[in-house]
Image (cartoon, rainbow, N blue to C red):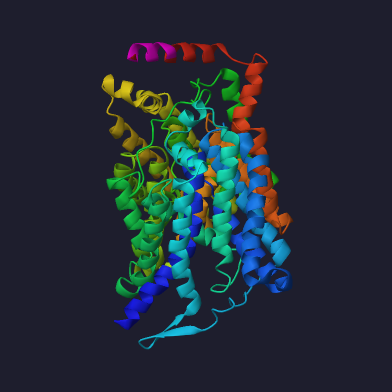
Amino acid sequence: MAFYVAQFLTGLASAASLFLVASGLSIIFGVTRIVNFAHGAFYMLGAYVAFTLTEYFSGAFGFWGGIVAAALAVATLGVLVEIVLLRRIYHAPELFQLLATFGLTLMVEDLVVLIWGPSDLLGRRAPGFKGAVDFFGQSLPSYDLFLIVLGPAVLGILWLLFQRTRWGVLVRAATQDRDMVAALGVNQKWLFTSVFAVGVFLAALGGALQIPRDAVNHAMDLRIIVDVFVVVVIGGLGSIFGAFVAAVLVSELNAFGILIFPKISIILVFLVMAVVLIVRPWGLFGKREAPARRTPGLTVNPWRPLTSAERLAVCIALLAAAALPVIGGNYAVTVGSEIAIFVIFAISLHFLMAVGGLASFGHAAYFGLGAYGVAFLAKMAGLPMIACLLLGPLLGCLGAAVFGFFAVQLSGVYFAMLTLAFAQIVWSVAFQWVEVTGGDNGILGVWPERWASSPSHFYWLSLGIAALAAAGLRILVFSPFGFALRAMRDSPLRSEAVGINGKRVQWTAFVISGTVAGVAGALFAYLKGSVFPDNLGIPLSVDALVMVLLGGVETVSGGIVGAIVYKALNIWLVSQTDLSKLVLGGFIVLIVVAFPKGIVGTLEMIRHRHGGGSSEASSETRLMGSRIETAE
């Protein structure tokens, strides 16, 4: 019994730091509506700066002074980021803000390696808490007991701040209805800045307090951000008490899961998150938000069919791409195959986001399921390559059908977070079910047959499938199904009033999108000759989001262009510099600030300003206008 009590107390100690980071993210997201992927980077910076101040400037600050000074320094940096970067894009679509913070995360990852080096850093013990306390034969670190007390103390301070101060009242009001707060004359600009500063301070403090417990390393940001998102969603957006309860719940599941349910220990927290989102989407202690108001300029403009000149340009581009094996070497052809595969992956998500208005944060699940489907059929059933390519993506289709049924019941950020939870569940199964998936060792030897084994032949295969996928999805866009899906995106109530079964249409779109992603995963398995759990991971899902947003979510071809630019730039930078993430992140931030509509969206906007609109575009606009008037 003493062992389990000690394990429980260890979980409480971990919950303290998790609560600090999660409460900061909950405050920021609740008020500014920014899905701040950089929050983990601020946590990591807090740990690195605290290590430097306590190790090399202990005479000036002392240990505890160094911890607080590190949090204040990173909070100051957060204020600069908010003023210089985020303040410029508050009126941009929320997903572009996600893209900007992701670019910032990439930059920070390389900067910490450049400044502090790639090796893990071991911080010193906290003065006064260097020993352990004997608990019925179990040794508990005294520092863990300090953290157990610190968690409720910080919760109490935050409660007083938000319940007994005017600033706290404004923050709570903005969490529920930002527009009403603005209508009352509150300066949202500085309210957002102060909220961001407090949130970053809490994240940095959580990181700084970890240096006596864990080694400081440049992977801390991604390790913490997943758990933080889980805590925020379970607890409820904007709820500090909810973040505290959820942090304890998640930490205890992590502490006891490995003991009680070793086979599914990693899945537990995501199962809880999925159940909470399905039963109570706004979290255990969250509140229903005020109805979202449509921001002018964010709706996707009616699309138009290709003109004759554009069809000719597409044919020329395909012929030029097909000629790559003639003018390039094997390396260039292999890179071309990878880009073609990621074009398929990107357009599958782009279809769901642009036409359906559904932003999936876990789209890699169906990419990875397609890859595993091919691996199972090729290695275990011994089927030929053609059969594997036809049947393997069906595993992605099955996953999308099951997960999509629950996901489309939600909308907005709750839909996105549920897709993230499902993706992490699939990743956890692949990682822990070693007997079937090989676990972290993966499934090796998934090589194409002789007819497709040469780089040029595989490239032509990938390019052909990419062209067919793009053409098929474009046909769907202009089909009656596509019009119904776009109607659900723009006005669910009106759509259902004219007889459209909205949830069924969205579920069908989800299944189509997941199946196409599975096709990309199937080709990727043959390209790499192996399948690993990383093919299902969050970084790959984020890559897909970046490709779509980079190209332009308000366009038809944005996914294609975004995938080509992002993947080609990523591969080229890795071969040219050790600071590829820094350069790529800076490029992403520049695109978001300078071209918030994406590459293709910006080019189309410039063309229309110079009178480039076509008669077909006008006719398409009139057609959509008549449809909307009929619906109304």
Q: Residue at x 47, y 47 (%)?
A: 162
Q: Measuring from the top left, give residue 140's x and y in whole percent.
A: 44, 81
Residue 132: say if magenta: no
Q: Residue at x 52, y 84 (%)?
A: 131
Q: Measuring from the top left, give residue 607's x and y in whole percent.
A: 65, 20
In the image, taking residue 49 as reference, residue 140 lies left or right, namely left
| Quarter containing the C terminus | top left
Q: Is residue 624 above or below residue 95?
A: above
Q: Residue at x 46, y 46 (%)?
A: 164
Q: Which residues are magenta?
A: 625-631
Q: Measuring from the top left, give residue 127's x and y in whole percent.
A: 59, 78
Q: Residue at x 30, y 45 (%)?
A: 280
Q: Measuring from the top left, give residue 511's x and y in whole percent.
A: 35, 41
For the image, the number of numbered tags is 0
Residue 216 seen:
yes
Q: Is residue 327 above or below residue 538?
A: above
In the image, taking residue 249 as reference, residue 28 lies left or right, namely right
Residue 626: say if magenta: yes
In the image, taking residue 88 as reference, residue 626 lies left or right, namely left
Q: Main secondary structure of the magenta part?
A: helix
Q: Image quarter for residue 243?
A: bottom left
| Quarter containing the N terminus | bottom left
